Image (cartoon, grey):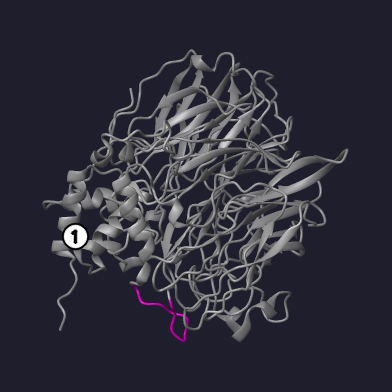
Amino acid sequence: MIAKWRWRASVGLLILAMAGGVVCASTDSDNVDWPAYGGAQGAPNYSTLRDINTGNVTQLRLAWQWQTGETPLKEFGTSPGMFQTTPIVIDGVMYLSTPYNRVVALDPATGRQLWSYDPRPYVDGQPPNGTGFVHRGVAAWRDPASRALHIVIASRYRLIKLDARSGKPVAGFGHEGVVNLLEGLQWPVNPRHFTNTSPPLVYRNLIIVGNGVADRLIYRRDPPGDVRAYDARTGRRVWSFHTVPRAREFGADTWRNQSNKFTGHTNVWAPMSIDARRGLLYLPVGTPSNDFYGGNRPGANLFADSIVCLDANTGRRRWHRQLVHHGLWDYDSPAAPALVQIRRSGRTIDAVVQLTKQGFVFAFDRVTGEPLWPIEERAVPPSDVPGEQASPTQPAPAGLPVLAPQGVTLEDATDLTPELHAEAVAVLKRLRIGGLFTPPSTQGTLIRPGLLGGADWGGGAFDPDTGILYVKVNNDPALVYPDITDAQGNVPDVGPNDTGDETVFLHHRIPLLKPPYAFLDALDLNAARMHWQVPFGDNEAVRNHPALKDAKLPAALGAVGTAGAIVTRGGLVFVGGGDAAFHALDKRSGADLWRYSTGGAKTNGTPMTYRSGGRQFVVIAVGGPGPGAALLAFALGAQAQGIGPAAAALPEGHGVTLVERACSQCHSLDTVTGKRLNRKQWEAQIDAMIAKGARLSDEQYEEIAAYLAAHFGAAPEG
């Protein structure tokens, strides 16, 4: 059985087989593949498989598991992060990526490893971002002449093409199978500051890639977010789309003070999607640098925080819609735009749906970009931060329900006990609160949804039979301050978002706002109404908190997490979504029909499903960082050995072990050693770490806080 482990979570991976929205059968009619991230390149997260259904799902058992075996590497100062992959299955072979960006091929019926390729991205050190070493998937390209299959991965600043049979780089692609993604950018980029977590997108003979940039990297000419397409045979760059328009390009006038000449980010870090029949590529574009202050980039800032449709063959813009003007909230477009069909007034519309962190659902005609429901420009509060010029309005779709609560009032303070309610109200009164799009402030602004949404990179799961979109969403606020830049666009290494002593938790664990902390939504796009919404998952740290020992708590407190769901013709929605359990819900009602406890391991991947050897499997990635991170594959009536506990690295010194275990999950220890904070400030940082999924006992919390305050305390004044 799964060992309970407070520090490391394992991610289960669900295997679904389909292509282009229809299940794709291989030459063996018993086998059904899952050939692309999201099941197909339109990101449906749907399968027509129904071997596992509402009538037999209670018989689902663990069939096999595969562990990454990755550990911290002291010689490089790195640690693997959460296991967030979603595998693909093609021609009866499973392919996946690991936190350290290894590409692995498995037998999907047994989990037996066939080969592994290590691109060694850890040689460049720990990624300086909030997620650390994570990777969510690979893509496949089949040579139309030879029919040979190749697997491609974007690993940090390199695009790598592998032979699917051997796992070896293909020599004719780039330089010995590798393309340097830093070449051709607008300005030189530090290789350690350029990363990728999402799979590339393959269209015909093109491999299309975006990139990731750490939010906390804020400096003049930080890494740009150009989207590029490369020849799948040779690695030659075919086209490049500038997400920050250059001089004389459309949208350049939305970057006043020539800020387009030095502003980076504005990147497509989430997966992309494509209408292959029409050759239309859809980009979910993120926030420009920096997330919480735009005084040095006045204007609306196209194409930031937008959905952009390109001609996939040429990279030319077909249409776009900005979903946040002059972003100040880290409200990236976080998920692959979903290609769906919506039935309205007796006709079927080929649509594209963009989910957002702010909890909105935007739907457009796939070809023209016309909104299917009106988009209103609503007045929002101004900013009082010196130099900031916030947009006076922000777009909001009219006619569709929102996915998650928006904004904060005193009425939202937790009511789990009268005492906690009073404490929460006192904290809220010290902060700036208000409606959606209340700007960051030097006082500290509590925004809801927070940085993890609403919706996040897991996206939605669309059922074409009913027109219902299933979305795991978070109800989790964030406390933000403006990272005010100097005249050159730089900020101090340690800013207000790193040193504030306010926290969004009471007693280190209990969220300020009322539960539930997450939902699973079923949105009927044909009827434009919420079919159902249920609290999703639980929070063990809150449920077992001493301050709540006599409180009557909801059955489901809600589990904050960024992974998504899949839906099947068997009547089921499979989802982990950050909970310490994997769930199968009745898609008609939201009733929880089956649950598999993963102990202390969080479900960090979006599931998938497939059929191999006549059996349907569902797979999910769980856990991490380090040993214990595993793929879990489930089938009817099967039973396999569970996950063992993860081993911890044990550096010398009392308290250092806990600090290394906790802090290296998402970032290098340089992030800790580079700070000098007082005890209360360190506690606020640990609270933020817990919000991102760290599991600590009260004793561990105290040991970490004491160690950090003693060894990395605030420097004495004078």
In the picture, measured across the screen, residue 250 lies left or right of residue 284, that is: right
Q: Which residue is at the front of the view, 630 or 346?
A: 346
The spot of residue 53 in percent (x, y) is 60, 18
Q: Residue furthest left?
A: 654
The spot of residue 97 in percent (x, y) is 48, 43
- In the image, the segment drawn in magenta is 484-493
Q: Could you say which quadrant of the image residue 626 lies in?
A: top left
Q: Is residue 189 highlighted in magenta?
A: no
User: Which residue is drawn at the image coordinates 46% and 30% (left, top)?
Assistant: 582
User: Which residue is drawn at the image coordinates 42% and 73% (left, top)?
Assistant: 483
Q: Is residue 399 visible?
A: yes
User: Which residue is drawn at the image coordinates 25% and 48% (left, top)?
Assistant: 661
Kindly state the secondary structure of the residue where label 1 is placed.
helix
The secondary structure that most of the magenta stretch takes on is loop
Q: Which residue is at the front of the view, 639 or 577?
A: 577
Question: Which amino acid type is shown beneath numbered disc 1?
Answer: Leu
Q: Is residue 392 above or below residue 153?
A: below
In the picture, measured across the screen, residue 464 lies left or right of residue 431, that is: right
Q: Is residue 490 highlighted in magenta?
A: yes
Query: Which residue is denoted by mark 1 in the rendering?
Result: 708
Quadrant for the N terminus, please.
Answer: top left
The spot of residue 357 in percent (x, y) is 56, 54
Q: Is residue 276 visible?
A: no
Q: Is residue 662 above or below residue 391?
A: above
Q: Could you say which quadrant of the image residue 568 lies in?
A: top right
Q: Is residue 314 above or below residue 598?
A: below
Q: Is residue 441 above or below residue 137?
A: below
Mark 1 packing: few (<14 Cα in 10 Å), some, or many (20+)? many
Q: Which residue is at the front of the view, 301 or 666?
A: 301
The spot of residue 153 in percent (x, y) is 54, 49
